[in-house]
Every structure is written in C-alpha cells, then in structure tokens.
Amino acid sequence: MIRRTSFTILLALSAFAFAQRTAQAQELPKPGPEHAKLKKMEGNWDCVFEMQGQKSKATASYKSICGGMWMANDFKGEVFGIPFTGHGLDGYDQHEKKYVGIWVQSVESAPMHYEGNHDDKGVLVMTGTSPGADGKPQKYKNTTAWKDDDHFTFKMFMIGEDDEEQLAFTIEYSRKK
C-alpha cells in the first residue's frame, strides 16, 4: 500500500513537472499589427450619438488590457433621455484571423457577439446576431471608419430578412485633448 501511494505521488509530481516544462516551452501569443490598430482607440473620447434624427452627447474610454491582446471600453450617455451605459471587449483572434468582440449594455440583458475584418477601404466591418425587440434573432452590422487619429465614426445597421441594411444609429468620436 505504501509503495502504491509513493508511486502515485511520484507520478503526480512528474506529471506536474512535465506540464510546467511544456507550458514554459510554448510561446505565448503576442499582440500583432491587428492589435496595434485597435490600440489606436486607447484614450478618452467625446461622442455624439445620433438615432432617428435625435442627437445626444456621451463619453467613451478605451483601455488596452491583457498585455495588449484586448481593448476594453466603457460608454456613458443618454438615449432619448434615458441613462445608458455599455461595456465592450474587442480583440483579434489570431487563430481565426478575424476581429472579435462582445458588447453588454444597460438596456439589454443579452450580450452582443460580433466578428469581422477590415474591408478594402480600411473600414472595420463586424457582423453578428442578437435578440431583437421582438425577442427573435436580429442580424446586424457595425462599421468603424477612421477619419484621422483623433476622429472615427461608428455605425450600426440592422439587417432585414431580405438582407437589406437599415441604419440604426451613428456615433461620432472625437479624442479628448
């Protein structure tokens, strides 16, 4: 019995040592040029949110986290006089070769997942599905277009059953100086 227990302990210690050596030998992922594009967003922003012809002011902050692999963002403002907050996490999946993200907000209980890449004009185009106002799956498309290092425009489009896009809202971002 003692011999079997000693063997089990020795086997467990050997497995642990092997796992440590294997983990150390593997190279951890490092941020690439796609992460550098996301890092351009780092900082604090003044925003103008426009929906159905109504405009409201908001603020956003972006911060690089997890060694530069992810960009976390916080958004605060009002939509039709209702306080609104949102939090996002964006990154680049080096295995799938696409940008990925998740968005949660104060006016919805389900998260939005999205993925995509830059188009031939340099606009980041992300698509996904989330519950619509009727609870059924709603397809959407987001675009992020840079004007310069201190200004970008975010647009969200709802995609109908006929694949027709309808602009839901626009947010103009200006870097705080």
Image (tube, rainbow, N blue to C red):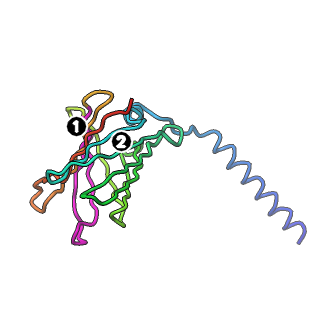
Residue named by callout 2 = 97
Q: Are marks 1 and 2 in contact (CB under 8 Å)?
A: no
How many tags in the picture? 2
Sequence-wise, which precedes: disc 1 or disc 2?
A: 2
The part of the image, by quadrant, that contains residue 110 is: bottom left
Magenta highlight on residue 143: yes
Residue lying at 36% horizontally and 59% vertically, measured from the top left: 105
Residue at the far top: name it: 148
Q: Position of residue 4 (x, y in %)?
A: 84, 67
In the image, taking residue 177 as reference, residue 51 lies left or right, namely left
**Image coordinates for residue 77, horizontal then vertical, percent:** 33, 51
Tell me where residue 117 sits by quadrant: top left
Horizontal side, residue 75 vs residue 124: left or right: right
State the image coordinates of residue 109 (x, y, percent, origin top left): 36, 67
Give the residue displayed 36% in from the left and 42% down from the top.
97
- As drawn, 148 above or below 14: above
Q: Amino acid at mark 1?
A: Asp
Q: Quadrant of the C terminus?
A: top left
Left or right of 53, for residue 146: right
The residue stretch that appears in magenta: 123-146
Q: For mark 1, what is the residue?
A: 119
Q: Position of residue 87 (x, y in %)?
A: 40, 52
Viewer-nearest residue: 172 or 135: 172
Q: Is residue 149 above or below residue 98?
A: above
Which of the pair 17/88 is nearer the observer? 88
Secondary structure, mark 2, is loop
SS of the residue under disc 1: loop
> In percent of the image, x 26 and y 32: which residue is there?
146
Residue that lies at the very extreme toward the right in this rendered image: 2
Mark 2: amino acid: Lys
Q: Is residue 3 above or below residue 18?
A: below
